[in-house]
Image (cartoon, grey):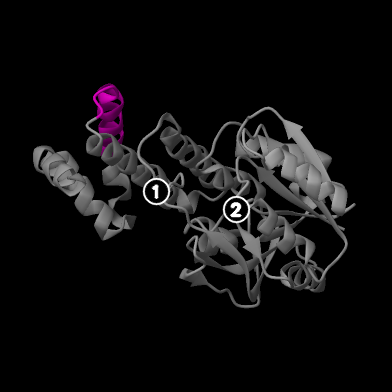
Amino acid sequence: MISVIVPVYNVEKYLEKCVQSVQKQTYRALEIILVDDGSTDESGKICDELKKKDDRIKVIHQKNQGLSAARNAGLEQAKGEYVAFIDSDDYIEKEMYERMLFALENNSADICMCGYKMVNEQGNILMKEIFENKVYRGAEIIEKFVLPLKTAAWNKLIRRESIMDNRFPHGKIHGEDLVFFSSYFTEKIKLVTVDYLGYSYVKHSNSITTRKFSKRSFDEVYCKDISSLEISHRYPQYERKTICWGFRARINLIRKLIVQDNNLYNEVIEEYLKWLREKYGFIKNVLDKKTKIEYMLLIHFKILYKYVLRRRRG
């Protein structure tokens, strides 16, 4: 059995399409766990109505604690030999779990990963990524998937016993997947990819990765720093490349604060600038050109940098 965990929060517009795409899977031995994370719209009621129509559906209602807590609650209740996650505003192709399960069992793997397409709310394809049929282990996984941040939970099927006590970081909403998989991908883990475009990720204009600064924006820095320490401890050869995560995350956050002319965090900006200066010499040879240029502007031409950003905002 596969336990499909669906965190739900204020997605009344998208929830039924998401759940129906799971119900229509050609692989039928599913446990569909809907975790209503304190929704204030009709999402909780929709979960209960869906449960009445399909005995494979289980519903958990809890006070709002965030995406990570919702996924963790689903993991605690999961009974399947395999576990999958799907975001409640996305949807999947009908053969996705059948194909992934076949690849897992045929290769005695711990985790399977399929291709995905990013679509807008009208269903238009913005981009897609397809993988080949291949098996990876140890440092290969880090090099191919973790370093380039292909660590989203939603296009993967995982053998539940391999998860052990790994959980998503409570209260974090940007970078939580990276933290989870940085701990999960040990030398013992075997990953298989399939050349099937199974997952549709719906890109919203107000998503966490596109909207303006909020206090939750700090999650990216926290999660990438924690993940960098985890990976570099086991794979010291990747220390420079993982520090680049935190380097870019700090620049992203500084940029958001400058664009909004937010003076409440001036001390944080100065702290981040100090960190950037300290790390630059160590990682500059592995930084991409765009990040190097932005760093130079930020450090040496700060007034010009602010002017350009604010002009673009205007």
* Residue name at image x 75 percent, y 47 percent: 163
SS majority, magenta? helix
Q: Which residue is mark 2?
A: 89
User: Residue 110: x percent and y percent?
Assistant: 75, 60
* Residue name at image x 57 percent, y 67 percent: 116
Query: Element type at marker 2?
Result: loop
Q: Is residue 97 above or below residue 294?
A: below
Q: Nearer the viewer, residue 101 or 119?
A: 119
Left or right, 171 with reference to 278: right
Q: Is residue 241 magenta?
A: no
Q: Is residue 269 magenta?
A: yes
Magenta stretch, residue numbers: 262-278
Q: Nearer the viewer, residue 79 or 17?
A: 17
User: Residue 177: x percent and y percent?
Assistant: 58, 47
Quadrant (top left, top right, bottom left, bottom right) of the C terminus: top left
Q: Amino acid at mark 2?
A: Asp
Q: Residues within 10 Å of mark 1 (few under 14, many from 20)?
A: few
Q: Is residue 240 above or below residue 226?
A: below
Query: Element type at marker 1?
Result: loop
Count of marks placed on residues? 2
Left or right, 140 with reference to 124: right
Residue 210 bears which disc, if any?
A: 1
Q: Residues within 10 Å of mark 2 (few under 14, many from 20)?
A: many
Q: Amino acid at mark 1?
A: Thr
Q: Is residue 17 above or below residue 281?
A: below
